[in-house]
Amino acid sequence: MQPRELIPDIFCVGAIDWDRRLFDSLIPLPDGTSYNSYLVKGKEKTALIDTVDPPKTDILEANLQAMDIKTIDYIITHHAEQDHSGALPRILEKYPEAKAVCTPRCKELLASLLAISEDRIVTVEDKESISLGGKTLEFIHFPWVHWPETMLSYLKEDRILFPCDLFGAHLAASDLYVTDEGQAYESAKRYYAEIMMPFRTNIQKSWPKLDGYTIDMIAPSHGPIHRKPEFIMSAYKDWVFSEPKNTVVLPYISMHGSTRMMVNHLVEAIMGNGVTVKQFDLTVTDIGKLAMELVDAATIVLGVPTVLAGAHPNAIYAAFLANALKPKAKFAAIIGSYGWGGKAVEQLTGLIPNLKVEVLGTVLCKGLPQEADYKALDELAANIARKHQEAGIK
Ligand code: FEO
């Protein structure tokens, strides 16, 4: 990979990770990712904005070498997570005059995660700036997107926002800029759902800090660069601030078909009530897809059979995940089947304290669903539609 110029004196020198398929040993990456590192050359000083994931350090080094960069004065370290700071120790070693620039909270994390010594770090306060000579970087503290220490940078003269993970996308692409807005939207929404959604209220609190900036370009640390900032910013405004939409997400699992029969019936009934529904079989579901649908859903219905005297473990995983992602759903319900008894409902409801939902009830059947069970599912579907309407959800 070669350095790529954004505009004169600003280059992308990071790495594309085409083949990565899992992040945090948890999150599927169907389209790979990138670790964007940017070099900003002022008249007097040079700054590197973020580094790369440790296995890609050689690429970053080779790019700097290809540009014949002899001196780096600052390594702007927005975020201590290793996919951006992992190459920092090697770059600090190679450029002994360089200082890592970060928030005070990030300094602690760089010491504990990467053993960076204090004398190699300069901390900056919110709104503080440094001049590189004709290029001024202003730092905007933006905690909890998605770690507590994170900041963004704004390059005043060129009106470029470098937001690190915020507005990012796990998308490996040879194009420097967004070219396919549909794909960019899908990747950014998946990223938001998996990484940022649990911190939605924190983003809401910090969002007004961006109001005073004229932004011509957004250069995140994952995925392509946005030359139309309003595209990604309006998508985020919708995900972060809007009320949920008239949608039900229905993750389920079925062992011998009874729960599946209930799910099939309920999906038809929900559709019949004019509500959008998304069905996910948890034995084959990409959890990223499920997370994306949770961004907008007003209601979550979990379909679960009883096994080993409790809820099926895959349903427990889905409930745990939904609780961790803290979507803005307002309603929830549980449906499913059992052979002779069990504590599936108690188990599942105990797993979702973070979901601020009104529970619309449970429909459990013994063995195969009977007429009364189907009637209860019809009533649940009608109740969901009514509750959405009463809550003004469109
Ligand atoms: Fe892309 Fe939170 O690291």
Image (cartoon, helix red, strand yellow):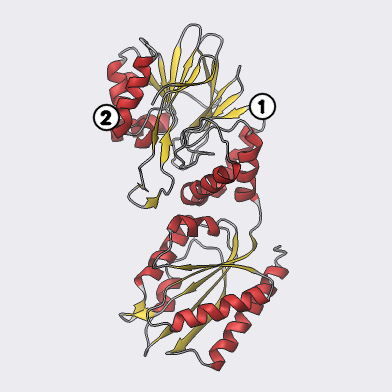
User: Residue 337 falls in which quadrant of the image?
Assistant: bottom left
Split into 4 quadrants, where in the image is the C terminus?
A: bottom right
Q: Is residue 339 left or right of residue 334?
A: left
Q: Residue 214: which numbered mark, if any?
A: 1
> Residue 174, how many percent across, how many down?
47, 33
> Residue 222, how many percent across, how many down?
46, 36
- For the question of whether residue 117 can be seen, the reply is no
SS for dot 1:
loop
Between 189 and 340, the one lying in front of the other is 189
Type of amino acid at the residue the image marks with label 1: Thr
Between 109 and 8, the one lying in front of the other is 8
Q: Residue 115: which numbered mark, if any?
A: 2
Split into 4 quadrants, where in the image is the N terminus?
A: top left
**Sequence order check: which comes first, mark 2 or mark 1?**
2
- The residue depicted at 58 percent of the width and 39 percent of the height is 206
- The residue depicted at 34 percent of the width and 12 percent of the height is 97
Q: Is residue 141 above or below residue 255?
A: above
